[in-house]
Amino acid sequence: MKLKIKKGDLVTVISGSDKGKSGKVLKVSLKDLRVLVEGVNVRKKHVKPSQKNPQGGVLSEERPIHYSKVMLLDGQGKPTRVGIKQSKDKEGKITRTRVAKTTGQEITEAKAGRK
């Protein structure tokens, strides 16, 4: 299954305890249908001392959430659904681009969620 949310996109959480928070997608897991969003779903983890972390203690880390709980932010910073637009170029190659349903603008990795 191919998701319409990619690494580097800015998304907002639409349900759950972190509803309303937004952040950048750090990782997308197709196998589990989960996304890791920066600053969202932060949990505490108790860690024993080790060579990597000699002091141990309590660490805060982001945990993945299901992709259906997030929506992509369009160029104006508003949540939007995502559509796919297909077009053919002169050689006959089909190119697929993501399109914001609210504004109709094409979504690129650099523009996604920028204000």
Image: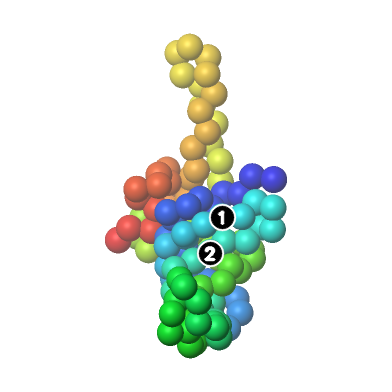
Q: Nearer the viewer, residue 103 or 68?
A: 68
Cα separation, mark 2 vs mark 1, equals 6 Å
Quadrant of the rendering where the C terminus is positioned? bottom left
Rendered residue at 50%/76% (across/down): 50
**Relative side of 103 to 1, left or right:** left
Rendered residue at 42%/54% (across/down): 8
Residue lying furthest top in this view? 91
Rendered residue at 33%/58% (across/down): 114
**Relative side of 15 to 110, left or right:** right
Q: Nearer the viewer, residue 86 or 55?
A: 55
Q: Mark 1 and mark 2 in contact (Cβ < 8 Å)?
A: yes
x and y percentages locating residue 51 in the rendered image:
46, 73
Residue denoted by label 1: 28
Q: Is residue 80 visible?
A: no
Three-letter amino acid code at the position of disc 1: Val
Determine whether 91 is above or below 57 in the image.
above
Quarter of the image for residue 113 reads: bottom left
x and y percentages locating residue 95 in the rendered image:
51, 28
x and y percentages locating residue 107 in the rendered image:
42, 46
Q: Name the element at disc 2.
A: strand
Q: Nearer the viewer, residue 58 or 60?
A: 58
Q: Which mark is residue 36?
A: 2
Q: Name the element at disc 1.
A: strand
Residue lying furthest front in this view? 51
Rendered residue at 49%/66% (across/down): 37
x and y percentages locating residue 98 in the rendered image:
50, 43
Sort mark 2 into few (<14), some (14-19) or many (20+) by Cα contacts within 10 Å. many
Quadrant of the rendering where the N terminus is positioned? top right
Determine whether 66 is above or below 84 in the image.
below
Three-letter amino acid code at the position of disc 2: Leu
Residue lying furthest left in this view? 115
